[in-house]
Amino acid sequence: MSDLLADDPEWADVVPIRQYENVNPIAPIFYNEEYKDATDYFRGVLKTGETSLRVLKLTERVIRMNPAHYTAWQHRYKTVIALQIPLEDELTKMDEIATTFLKTYQVWHHRRLLLTALNSVPAAARELVFLMSVLAHDAKNYHTWSFRQWILAHFNDETHLWRGERPYVERLLEDDVRNNSAWHHRFFVVFASGVRAGDEDRERVLRRELAFAKEKIALAPNNPSAWNYLRGALEHTGTPFATVAAFVEPYTASETPAPDVVDLDNPLPSPGAQLPCVAALEFLADIYEKEGGEKTAKAVEIWKTLVNEKDTMRKKYWEYRIREALHSASA
């Protein structure tokens, strides 16, 4: 039995519209028969503006074959609104499609439209839980993380929605300390969106976040995500880089030094760490450059080491830093 809409009596009243192509198209696209049939009838209902249950089924048919078909998504949303379909039901129905096609932007835009229309805190809380299951499949998916941050920003005043975010990120980083998406989300929750979870004292938050970043750097010294987080926390709060010099310096050595005393505020690199760490060398050079004066020469020496030995892939960048520093020093 044929699955084509052209053979379905329910669609006999719709005039299908074929995709326009020139007589001799330069690069014809060879769609399969099912997709051509579905999109021909979809163009037919678009022309008449029909919004009905059968159109709802048709949009799903098209979306499952081409989840990036933004016009199908747009008309689906229009149809859902016109038919007064419960928006919570539409969200639930789209769960499987979102999980299957999680790398497709249109999937998440549709959910954003639904949540905006609902403007429901319980629906937002439910969505955050759903997104955890999606991120369990792909913990670094850009579209999913962007949508999660949009939910939090949209429901900005709902503190309880934010409360679980930092512990959630910590669990992800326990699983994979190099998950740059999780590091980015932590920064968003802690800094970019303001202090959350009861208006914590900002100084205490900074101390906590510096300690967290240092701990993760010690675990995996050559993980740039943690170093970027440390750098971002300092820059965002206007804290001088020199305040963490004692922590950074051991990571620029050729091997982990034997501690005279245990310094819990400045954990040493983990045993067997590959040293010196390029990110630490860059960090220390930045500290010297900001201090200026005779310290500029120390920064230049570090950059020369990066040029010739430790980071030759970015040779041109380090040479640029050397030129700029020497020019500023001589001005």
Image (cartoon, rainbow, N blue to C red):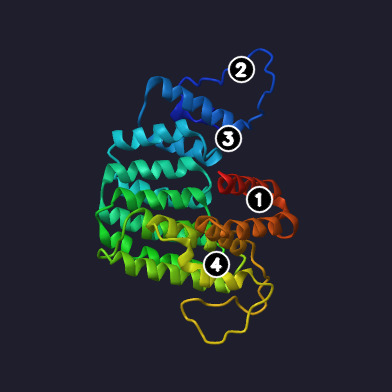
Q: Nearer the viewer, mark 3 or mark 4?
A: 4
Q: Counting residues from the N terminus, which is met first, the one under dot 4 or under dot 1?
A: 4
Q: Nearer the viewer, mark 4 or mark 2?
A: 4
Q: Which amino acid does label 4 sit on?
A: Val
Mark 3–mark 4 Cα distance, whole angstroms, equals 51 Å
Quarter occupied by the C terminus: top right
| Residue 303 quadrant | bottom right
State the SS at label 1: helix
Quarter occupied by the N terminus: top right
State the SS at label 4: loop
Q: Which amino acid does label 2 sit on?
A: Glu
Task: Quickly name the residue at label 4.
Answer: 177
Task: Quickly name the residue at label 2.
Answer: 21
Q: Counting residues from the N terminus, which is met first, the one under dot 3 or under dot 4?
A: 3
Q: Can residue 159 be seen in this view?
A: yes
Q: Is residue 182 visible?
A: no
Q: Counting residues from the N terminus, which is met first, the one under dot 1 or under dot 2?
A: 2
Task: Quickly name the residue at label 3.
Answer: 2
| Residue 14 quadrant | top left
Residue placed at 58% from the left, 33% from the top?
34
